[in-house]
Image (cartoon, helix red, strand yellow):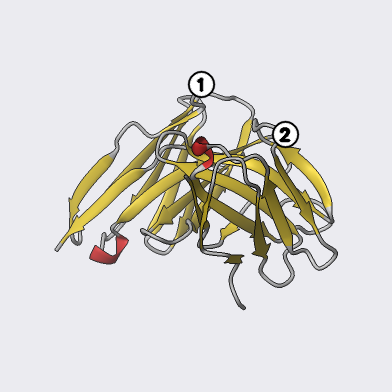
Amino acid sequence: DQQVKQNSPSLSVQEGRISILNCDYTNSMFDYFLWYKKYPAEGPTFLISISSIKDKNEDGRFTVFLNKSAKHLSLHIVPSQPGDSAVYFCAARVSGSARQLTFGSGTQLTVLP
Amino acid sequence: KAGVTQTPRYLIKTRGQQVTLSCSPISGHRSVSWYQQTPGQGLQFLFEYFSETQRNKGNFPGRFSGRQFSNSRSEMNVSTLELGDSALYLCASSFVAFGQGGYEQYFGPGTRLTVT
């Protein structure tokens, strides 16, 4: 049972445009959400996070939106740069589970110059 | 600050053997979590250690075990290796204040284990 779903395995965007990566979840007990990016042969790199008490969090070019009623999370990257090309994972933490994260399957983002 | 380091980076073992992987967290981070990444199952949580105690365990058989030392370094052990244990094993550390939070985890480069 996949509790965190990234339904788009891949996404291509032109340099300078907005990249929108989406994530859906099913577990109502998730209370913290994170986005990671991963380059080949490296471990995931933490990007940005959001608590379930918020609906938006910004950090530079990255903004995460949380829609709790729709159980939907999105990551906006503006403007997109070729160096952003990587696999992006969303992850979620179940309330009370210490630091156990449940990950989605990832979306390969390609930013075209 | 130095990042999370994992040793070895690559390992080839034979079915039935056992293996020990090592992880050194970021200085000051006392929580260490381990994840398995495979093409079929994605990133899956194995276990978390904080203050030398296992805090949480994922849905893996008892062949997978771990421990944490007083300097926060952690090891994971897999006994009686199976072909399906071939994976990238990732360690992540986080800063936990007063026993709370620390949900942002910082990952090491991983250990690529191949079981033949």
Residue B54 drawn at (x, y percent):
80, 45
Name the amino acid, label 1. Answer: Asp
Q: Is residue A18 visible?
A: no
Of B82 and A23, nearer the camera is B82
> Tag count in the figure?
2
Name the side, left or right, on which B16 lies relative to A35. Answer: right
The residue to which callout 2 is attached is B62
Q: Secondary structure at mark 1?
A: loop
**Above or below for B24 versus B75:** below
Residue A11 drawn at (x, y percent):
24, 44
**Above or below for B107 versus B57:** below
Q: Residue B80, labelled with which disc?
A: none
The residue to which callout 1 is attached is A1
- Indicate the quadrant where residue A14 lies: bottom left
**Label 2–label 1 contact, CB within 8 A:** no
Name the amino acid, label 2. Answer: Gly
Residue A100 drawn at (x, y percent):
66, 41
- Indicate the quadrant where residue B24 lies: bottom right
Q: Chain of mark 1?
A: A
- Viewport quadrant of the N terminus of chain B: bottom right
| Residue farthest toward the top in the current orientation of the protein | A1
Name the side, left or right, on which B69 lies relative to A93. Answer: right
Of A17 and B99, nearer the camera is B99
Q: Chain of mark 2?
A: B
**Above or below for B96 versus A31:** below
**Above or below for A10 versus B108:** above
**Closer to the eye: label 2 or 1:** 2
Q: Secondary structure at mark 2?
A: loop
